Image (cartoon, grey):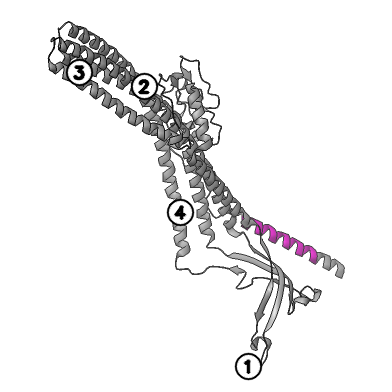
Amino acid sequence: MKRFDSVAGGSRLARRALAGGLLMTLVAACSMGPTYKRPDVETPTAFKEAPLPASEAGTWKSAQPADAAQRGQWWSIFNDATLNQLEDEALAANQDLKAAAARVRESRAGLDAARSAWFPDLGVGFGPTRERVSPASQGLPQNAYVPPVTLWRAQSTVSYEAPLFGRVSDNVSAARADSQQSEALFRSVQLALQADVAANYFSLRELDTEQDLYRRTVALREEGLKLVKHRYDAGEVSELDLQQATNSLATAKAEAAGVARQRAASEHALAVLLGKPPAEFTFAQQPLQSVLARVPAGLPSSLLERRPDIAAAERAMAAANARVGLAKSAFFPQLDVTGAFGYEASGLSQLFKWSSRTFLLGPFAGTALTLPIFDGGRRKADLARARAQYDEQVATYRSQVLQAFREVEDSLADLRLLDDQIRAQNDAVNAAARAEHLSEAQYREGQVNYLDVLDSQRTVLLAQRQASQLAGSQAVATVSLIRALGGGWGNAKPADTGTQQVAKQ
């Protein structure tokens, strides 16, 4: 009967221990933070500047995070080998990108540090201590003499804070969200770098077009000055025509120098993007050709999937939400378990004898279970601050989404209106060139004065410069649209030279 009672008692103890273990597990896994849910944002069914075809009107899809999706070499849609090479060099050597990569490694290390709280801290120690205990602690009279002693210790220690009320789980969740945010910010820096290289490249080539235009303009005005000087020497025109022609040539040379100065600064900026000192980088002059790449905008909801900056803002919200739970857990008890096992002796020669073994289980100082009672409102203030930080991140996220929609609409509007502007400007260039040809012919025949010729030449130069700048703006606007949409597409393929290039989503 006694044996039966003993077995039954042991069974009850085992069940209690199991129940206690399960309870501790549940308490440890229980997060004190509010359930995280990405806040809703108002998403239109189509972009204003890129309405959907009638067959797709009303189409809508829920945005699913896809910021880590493979973007592909989106710049290849421009079918430009030089740009491809520059992009590869920038991705390999840009210092801002390397700094962003280091921040990713830092955040991952922070996540590993947060996860380490799931495990106890173990340590070992060895060394002597010199101490003298009080007579009262030994039950001796007040004036009793207790000699000081030297104790040698060799022991291992363990300390562990029980992960109660989500202290560890919420901290790990926040660290994980921080790490994911750093990775999203890395992709944002990467996309910005790729877009900056492409935009700077096209701007540099547009300046090359302007330089080529000024070279031809200076050559033509030198020929014009020779003609006027010949007629002046022959007494056919006054000195006024000669000075006007001289002024026109000098003005063109001055403006050409200004364009060269802009080009030098643009070349230096491109060198820095490539991770090179400007002194070690030279870009051969290469006038810009018309960029025909077209990128469809797609559904607005997909923008929330693709933009890495939106993903980073969303992860910042998740981290702030977890830290609300971490602030709440400070209101609940904390359990610290500590222990030590080893050897202790008054002499080094006796230290590792079996009779010198010692152990301690429980807190070295203080109590194992602590419950905060009063702290002057610090915990309450910490919780209020955590909630305010979460509200801030929600507002930042929604603002980032609105900003993304605006950037897409701006780029789409730029491309649509630039098409109309370029067509009109090409007509202006043709008309100005015809007027210049007629004025020069009439001047040779003495029907107009040289001021009319200069006016027509200035009009042609201005029209050609504007046409060149519009071509550069069109290329940069295409890059801006791709950047605003969150990058390229893995299945994008360059089209044949001279035909429209299309990137399909």
Residue drawn at (43%, 19%) of the image:
292
User: How far apart, in angstroms, are the residues tagged by discs 3 and 1?
Assistant: 117 Å
Please name the residue that numbered disc 1 is placed on: 142
130 within the magenta span: no
Give the residue type that dot 3 points to: Ala
Label 4 vs label 2, nearer the camera: 2
Whether residue 336 appears in this view of the structure is yes
Which disc, if any, is residue 387? 4
Q: Which residues are magenta?
A: 9-28
| Residues under numbered marks 3 and 1 in contact, where contact means CB atoms less than 8 Å apart | no
Give residue 97's mark. none
Tell me which numbered mark, 1 or 2, is placed earlier along the sequence.
1
Magenta stretch, overall SS: helix
Q: Nearer the viewer, residue 449 or 368?
A: 449
User: Percent position (x, y) of residue 34?
Assistant: 52, 51
Question: Label 2, on which residue?
Answer: 209
Corner quadrant of residue 340: bottom right
Question: How far across and down, in percent of the image, does residue 329 sit?
Answer: 54, 59
Residue at coordinates 47% horizontally, 28% vertically from top-left?
299
- Mark 2: which amino acid? Thr
**Mark 1 touches mark 2? (CB < 8 Å):** no
Task: Indicate the secondary structure of the residue bearing disc 2.
Answer: helix
Instruction: Give the left or right position of residue 438, taking residue 163 as reference.
Output: left
Side of 147 where 491 appears, left or right: left
Give the residue pinned by disc 3: 245
